[in-house]
Image (tube, helix red, strand yellow):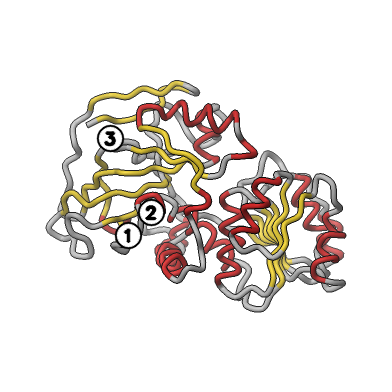
Amino acid sequence: MRKQIMTAPKTIAFVDAPIPEISDDQVLLRIEKIGVCGSDIHVYHGQHPFTKYPVTQGHECSGYVEKVGKNVTHVKPGDKVAIEPQEVCGECRPCRDGKYNLCEKLKVMGFQCLGTGAEYFACDKIRATKLPDDFSMDDGCMLEPLAVAVHAVGQAGDVSGKDIVVIGAGPIGNLVAQVAKGLGARRVMVTDVSDLRLQLAKECGADFAVNTRGRDFTEAIVSAFGPDRADIIYDCAGNNTTINQAIYAARKGSTILLVAVFAGMAAVDLAVLNDKELNLNTTMMFRHEHFQKGIELVAEGKVRLKPLQSIHFPFEQWADAYRYIDDHRETTMKVIIDVQK
């Protein structure tokens, strides 16, 4: 089989490797699609703080079950699956509490351990989530970022009937907005500096889409929601400008949820955060229930994934996909790698 290896920043090789053997508790997958995310781009540029080289990438993926171990009963050969790309210890306090996304020894496929960037991949049975028969492989490889959004939305509690702002209209921000609407939010505003991404957010159900390059953030919120402003602000951009926008614009006693991986050391106005008694919360990855809820939301037509799929690249043109993203940052959403010919 062919396998991807990033040997150094901006250096990708493809090698022949044996098809993995599986244990009694594992599943062998024929990988079909791999989605590219912002963290992959950080690895490509040598800017990911927790990834060493060489590394085989790929953590947003879908494929067919090729073979199962004798202890595997929830999937069978031919089934469509997505992978939950986490390796956890199962023994630390977060794991024992059921919050294995916070495992003290967490490793993520494609970053700290072997990724799915190969024609075949072996994973533990608990990492394989069965997809409905009518789920496309393209949608399947987006189930991982959708699960991120499901978990993130839930970190702020019940959003039913709430007025919500999402800062950042990239793939995660778009999905956070869609999930919030799907879970009963009253009205959702999405902000960004890209008109194309904002138009896509509107097409996917956002009630308001505001370009803050030329409009005051706080004024836009008051204009949309009135003097009570928003109940929850999700920061899906993650920089000093956006987190402080959220703090200054938030209604006293309301909630800010940091979804994005923050870019560098934060310079946050804690005095205002304290004065307003704001609830500043965070989110990290997902668990199995978030994959399942994501599948439900797609099946119910409450989340649309197809509009976010920008372009496909063949497996051995992976580096071209990264260069394309670098050259089209504000007009690109999800880039998908077609692993099989």
Residue at 66% over, 56% down: 258
Does residue 70 sit above or below 105 in this rendering? Answer: below
Q: Which quarter of the figure has residue 160?
A: bottom right
Q: Residues within 10 Å of mark 2 (few under 14, many from 20)?
A: many
The front one of 295 and 150 is 295
| In front: label 3 or label 2 | 3
Residue 263 point in image, percent of width and height = 67, 40
Residue 171 point in image, percent of width and height = 56, 50
Which residue is label 2 attached to?
A: 140
Residue at 47% over, 26% down: 320
Q: What is the three-letter code of the residue carrying label 1?
A: Thr
The front one of 82 and 152 is 82
Q: Is residue 31 left or right of residue 168?
A: left
Measure the alpha-carbon separation of dots 3 and 2: 18 Å
The front one of 263 and 190 is 190
Does residue 106 sit above or below 113 in this rendering? Answer: below
In the displayed orientation, state which residue is furthest to the left: 70
Which residue is label 3 attached to?
A: 341
Q: Secondary structure at mark 1?
A: strand
Q: Earlier in the sequence, mark 3 or mark 2?
A: 2
Q: What is the three-letter code of the residue carrying label 2?
A: Gly
| In front: label 1 or label 3 | 3
Residue 54 point in image, percent of width and height = 39, 26
